Image: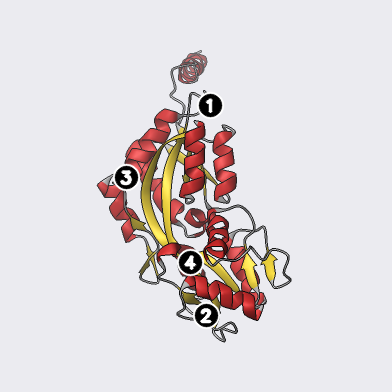
Amino acid sequence: MKKFKVLLLALALVSLLVAPGLVKAEEVLMMATTTSTDNTGLLDYLAPKFKADTGIELRWTAVGTGKALKMGENCDVDVLMVHAPAAEQKYVDSGALKDRREVMYNDFVIIGPDSDPAGVKGLPVAQAMKAIAEKKAPFISRGDNSGTHKKELSLWKAAGMAVPEKEEWYVQTGQGMIKSITIAEERDGYVMTDRGTYIKYSANKNGNPELKVLVEGDKNLFNQYSVLAVNSEKCPKARYDLATKYSEWIASPETQKVIGDFKLLGKKLFTPNAK
């Protein structure tokens, strides 16, 4: 009889614990982000700190910025971290996204083989693009509407050229950054990447990558990352409250320092610049 009473008491306690409303569900923030924040390991580095500071679990899908923006517009996520300012502004203007906040930056670089068949090393980016086209050297484009792809398209335009999408030497992968770099390796070609992903690629090669940075430092290669909340007026189920907490957290002085301290091969992958 005593054992029976103990069993009844245990069952009663379990029923109280699982009763609706008595157990607070874990808060989860869904984010769409560009591949570079994922490939570099930055989000794996930040997510546990965000959970420790706020109790909110961050889950993310890493895609090209174009797809990430669409995911926000389609109410598939709560918040975005992306890097295509002009495209971002269009979604803000449409009302799909709001509260755009700049949080960090790095830069784009053009990388290629040591042999540098197009002779682009040290050239301004516009001259480098023209030289690659003139030599018909293999150029690997992501071709996926990502932030990196959008920047690349703008560079052809800035060089006074049409995008050479019908040329045999111009290869569109439709893949992410690391995969596109691998294809450039295989073809002894050129490819544009953000510096953070290049550093990660170099680390994967023990600091001795096949492809080297050949074009860098041009003002047109600046690469700004921003956080945007999905507008809950357009997407009623979007967790705007959690998105706001994330935006405030990542822009805080403490987290900005954490971002600045994130390094591989002793090199900073992103520079914090939240205002």
Describe the element under mark 2 as helix, strand or loop: loop
Q: Which residue is at a point 63% across and 74% down the rendered structure image? A: 133
Q: Earlier in the sequence, mark 2 or mark 1?
A: 2
- Can the viewer see residue 78 in this picture? no
- Residue to which mark 2 is pinned: 120
* Residue 124 to residue 115: above or below: above
Q: Amino acid at mark 3?
A: Ala
Q: In this orientation, which residue lies closer to the viewer: 237 or 91?
A: 91
- Residue to which mark 3 is pinned: 251
How crowded pointer 1 is (Cα within 10 Å; few <14, some 14-19, many 20+) is rated as: some
Q: In this orientation, which residue lies closer to the viewer: 74 or 264?
A: 74
Mark 1 or 4, closer to the camera: 1
Residue 70 is drawn in which quadrant?
top right
* Disc 2 from disc 3: Cα separation: 37 Å
* Disc 2 from disc 1: Cα separation: 47 Å
- Can the viewer see residue 235 in this picture? yes
Q: Which residue is at a point 73% across and 65% down the rendered structure image? A: 166
